[in-house]
């Protein structure tokens, strides 16, 4: 049975785990992963005074490295730590795995074709698609206030991130290919988290889920790279540029640590709550940067933060009213007259 979590605890799920060290590791992993992702896909390696260097262009190779390390970590954990008896059919992991691989590929590729504002709007608006996908995949129903607050959170985060991002002149143009890739990223990512949410009905642990999903992810990605002949080229690029090898390894470590948090949160609280947490994380990462480095927060950005907190308070109020209504609906037995 999934425990209900009030909206005021969404952020606490990010910052409060079973231990302070583990929680800090999660946050450092996500922040490092985001920075490295952009570095690997948009900058050159091996540049000198006479040579501009070369860029790494095969995002599937990065996906493979991420999945292999995550599979190894989950496998070792399951080997040395006692896990619940596994009851889910293995083939069911393949659906989440395939959509996860396609989502990661679309996300990496989209960075080449979309501007910063487009990236922000796409990532900040994932909450509603995830809720809609939940209705299709697991027949989950949501209250009207949940849609309303999810929309307000998306709007508030978008306002804050757009006002705190780079100037339009320094941002590349958005192409039709980029928009299609972002649409694919949102659709596949929404399906992935909801399918994983449905699989937890088999009472498995989050690490078992991580192991099964990454097993099929490795198979799919290796097959695709071999079919394209890109596996060897990616390995050669890594051999030519030790800096890229270090970045790719650190990216994979961060991805594996992040997956532990992802599967735990989905298993405990559901796909929609997880997406809200990840959406708010983007805004708070930039807010922390503004506080640490003295960057100014614009009026629009401040208004966006106010909208987000208003939405969170509304969720707390609505959930509290819902619980009170449920308590009042419990019938009170009348005393038995003899």
Image (cartoon, rainbow, N blue to C red):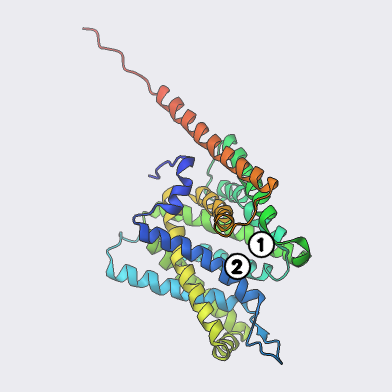
Are there few (<14), some (14-19), or many (20+) residues within 10 Å of tag 1? many
Considering every residue shown, the one lying at the far left of the view is 338
Tell me the tag on residue 174.
none
Q: Is residue 218 visible?
A: no
Residue nearest the viewer, comparing 29 with 182? 29
Q: Is residue 199 visible?
A: yes
Q: Position of residue 103 (x, y in %)?
A: 60, 65
Location of the N terminus (image quadrant) = top left
The number of numbered discs placed on residues in the rendered structure image is: 2
In this rendering, position of residue 297 left or right of residue 86: right
Residue nearest the viewer, comparing 326 with 227? 326
Q: CA distance from mark 2 to mark 1?
A: 8 Å
* First of labels 2, 1 by sequence position: 2
Are there few (<14), some (14-19), or many (20+) residues within 10 Å of tag 2? many
Residue at the spot x=34%, y=61% of the render?
86
Answer whether labels 2 and 1 touch (C-beta < 8 Å).
Answer: yes
Kindly identify which residue carries mark 2.
102
Element on which disc 1 rests: helix
Kindly identify which residue carries mark 1.
184
Residue at the spot x=57%, y=64% of the render?
99
Location of the C terminus (image quadrant) = top left
Q: Height in image: 104 above or below 199?
A: below
Q: Position of residue 265 (x, y in %)?
A: 44, 53
Q: Height in image: 205 above or below 300?
A: below
Residue at the spot x=58%, y=39% of the render?
311
């Amino acid at each position: 049975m999934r425990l209900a979590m009030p909206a005021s605890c969404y952020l606490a799920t990010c910052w409060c785990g079973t231990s302070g060290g583990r929680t800090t590791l999660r946050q450092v992993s996500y922040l490092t992963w985001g920075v490295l992702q952009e570095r690997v896909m948009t900058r050159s390696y091996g540049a000198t005074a006479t040579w501009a260097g070369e860029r790494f262009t095969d995002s599937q190779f990065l996906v493979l490295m991420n999945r292999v390390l995550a599979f190894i970590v989950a496998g070792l954990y399951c080997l040395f730590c006692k896990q619940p008896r596994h009851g889910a059919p293995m083939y069911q992991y393949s659906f989440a795995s395939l959509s996860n691989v396609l989502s990661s590929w679309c996300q990496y590729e989209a960075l080449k074709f979309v501007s910063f504002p487009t990236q922000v709007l796409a990532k900040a608006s994932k909450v509603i698609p995830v809720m809609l996908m939940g209705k299709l995949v697991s027949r989950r129903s949501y209250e009207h206030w949940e849609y309303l607050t999810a929309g307000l959170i998306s709007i508030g985060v978008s306002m804050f991130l757009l006002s705190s991002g780079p100037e339009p002149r320094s941002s590349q143009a958005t192409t039709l290919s980029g928009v299609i890739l972002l649409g694919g990223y949102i659709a596949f990512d929404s399906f992935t988290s909801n399918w994983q949410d449905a699989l937890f009905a088999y009472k498995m642990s989050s690490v078992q889920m991580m192991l099964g999903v990454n097993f099929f992810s490795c198979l799919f990605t290796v097959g695709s790279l071999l079919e394209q002949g890109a596996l060897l080229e990616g390995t050669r690029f890594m051999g030519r540029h030790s800096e890229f090898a270090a970045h790719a390894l650190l990216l994979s470590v961060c991805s594996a640590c992040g997956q532990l948090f992802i599967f735990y949160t989905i298993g405990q609280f559901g796909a929609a709550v997880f997406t809200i947490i990840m959406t708010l994380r983007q805004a708070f990462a930039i807010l922390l940067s503004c506080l640490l480095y003295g960057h100014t927060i614009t009026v629009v950005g401040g208004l966006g933060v106010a909208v987000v907190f208003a939405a969170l308070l509304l969720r707390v109020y609505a959930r509290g009213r819902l619980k009170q209504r449920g308590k009042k609906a419990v019938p009170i037995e009348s005393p038995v007259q003899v």
